[in-house]
Amino acid sequence: MGHPLRCYYPGVVYEITSRTIQERFLLRPGPRSAEIIVGVLARGLELHPEVALHAFNYQSDHYHMMMSSSDGARLSRFLGFVNGRVASEMGRLHGWRGPFWARRARVVPTTDDKGVIERLRYVIGQGVKEGLVASPRDWPGASSTSALLGDMTVEGVYFDRDAETRARRYRALSHPLEFSRKITLRLTPIPPWAHLSADELRARHVALVAGIEATALPQVVGPARLQRVDPLARPAQPARSPAPLCHASDPAMRRAYRSFYRRLCAAFRALSSRVRAGETVERDEFPPGSFPPNLAFIRPSEGARPPWLELAATGTT
């Protein structure tokens, strides 16, 4: 399960994960599913330009994304749009009706630059560590690997279902792809590498992929077999692990974030209890970066550093 209280700070990189209902293989990799998912991600970035997508990897029954934003409310809306459209399109593709995702997406902050690089390697390496493919380059589904090793772009196809529905009210469609369009998704470099030139950035990504390939198992399932899996099937032994509170590169940073989160939860719950009791609570009393009940997102002040960095710097836990 994800953690109950989400808190978004500008520039912080979040790893976001969600699993399909009953862990069915509804995201089965293949060229068709890849272009659909990339198209949805690209459209989401068009609608929410405040969001930066750093990496993504869609496995058969779950996905990982790394994102940051100058506006936490926009990041939340982007995530809602993407999960809704992916569920609709992949359900349509595989003839699946009913709930698509098992639960609300897991949103985990990465607390420092070294931790961000470690998570990038982890996201790229999905599919290799499980023995499914020998290299991130071989993953046949939606993945940011080709973009990271190239010019930071990847092509997808977006279906405008709203326009299609409106058109169907008045006429028959002339072609199944009448309301589809090619769309380009552009990744944003992770913050620790944002200052690098295009060639330097590509070299860092190549090095990450090479390191992942060096850890590949001698025998792998292979892309061809992955694409033949029944999308409505389920894994015999689902892999589950508890969600971490944060991703940190060292214990001190992790302790600092836990200290911040305890204080955040205590303040938020106290204020929420007052609201439920009928008291008048001013919106700006709620912690920055949070979503108060029935109120708009509380934006942190411009240029504000994430509180856990201050706690780590002072050794306060």
Image (cartoon, rainbow, N blue to C red):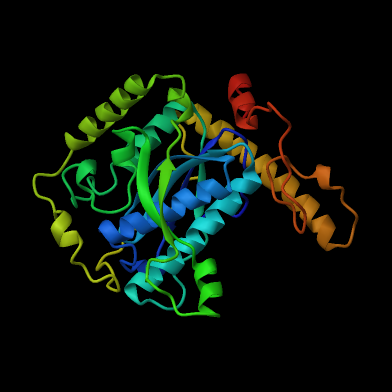
Against 187, residue 228 (above or below) is below
Q: Position of residue 294 (x, y in %)?
A: 77, 59
Name the side, left or right, on which 211 lies relative to 26: left
Count up the numbered dots: 0
- Of residue 84 and residue 4, the one placed in the foreground of this image is 84
The residue that appears at 37% across and 33% down in the rendered structure is 118
State whether residue 241 appears in this view.
Answer: no
Q: Hey, which residue is sitting farthest right in the picture?
A: 280
- Of residue 276 and residue 174, the one placed in the foreground of this image is 174
State whether residue 186 appears in this view.
Answer: yes
The residue that appears at 27% across and 73% down in the rendered structure is 233
Q: Position of residue 280 (x, y in %)?
A: 90, 54
Tell me the quarter of the image containing the C terminus: top right
- Of residue 25 and residue 179, the one placed in the foreground of this image is 179
Name the side, left or right, on which 187 lies relative to 277: left
- Quadrant of res 304: top right
Name the side, left or right, on which 271 lies relative to 107: right
The residue that appears at 49% across and 70% down in the rendered structure is 164
The residue that appears at 47% across and 33% down in the rendered structure is 248
- Of residue 315 and residue 282, the one placed in the foreground of this image is 282
Q: Position of residue 131 (x, y in %)?
A: 18, 50
Name the side, left or right, on which 235 lies relative to 76: left
Q: Hey, which residue is sitting farthest left in the picture?
A: 218
Q: Position of residue 36 (x, y in %)?
A: 37, 58
